[in-house]
Image: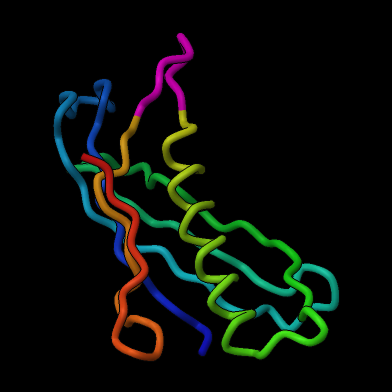
Amino acid sequence: MLPRRGVIEIELLRRYGRTPAGTRAVGWFEVSETGEVYFTHMREVHIRVADDPRVVGGPAWFPWPREPGVSPAASEARLLERVLWDVVRSVEERQTKTKHQRFRVVRAEWEDGPAGGERGAVSSG
């Protein structure tokens, strides 16, 4: 059921303002339906690094059509999996001016797991 909220933890690979590399920060991400015809869903990422006033992330709108012949639960599971990977990719693709990767995602998971008590998660070691 939407909206769904998750938690994300990142590690700085490069300095971010006055915050040194190696610092970790925890934030949230969320997916919800927009009610629009084409851009039917929105995902938002919000990570605050130390006392820096800038927020890592932001909103992104995307279409997610219902697939014919697929149950609503299966369609939602695919949606949540895609959003999880999109969140990780969008954060890890951020670069410095010299094109170095700025962040590494340590953990990203949904706060309230799908039916059956499983938690969708992405984690890197």
At a point 48% along the width and 14% down the height, the residue shown is 99
72 to 65, vertically: above or below: below
99 to 8, vertically: above or below: above
Q: Using residue 11 as the reference point, say whether residue 77 is left or right of it.
A: right
100 drawn magenta: yes
At a point 43% along the width and 19% down the height, the residue shown is 96
The segment highlighted magenta reads 95-102
Q: Main secondary structure of the magenta part?
A: loop
Q: Quadrant of residue 27?
A: bottom left
At a point 25% along the width and 45% down the height, the residue shown is 106
Rendered location of residue 97, percent (x, y): 47, 14
Q: Between residue 75 and residue 39, name the one nearer to us.
A: 75
Rendered location of residue 3, percent (x, y): 50, 83
51 to 43, vertically: above or below: above
Q: Quadrant of residue 71?
A: bottom right
Q: Quadrant of residue 66?
A: bottom right
78 drawn magenta: no
Q: Between residue 59 and residue 1, name the one nearer to us.
A: 1
Q: Using residue 38 as the reference point, say whether residue 28 is left or right of it.
A: left
Rendered location of residue 60, percent (x, y): 62, 57
At a point 33% along the width and 52% down the height, the residue shown is 47
Residue farthest along the front direction in this orientation:
69
Residue farthest along the top direction in this orientation:
98
Rendered location of residue 6, percent (x, y): 35, 69
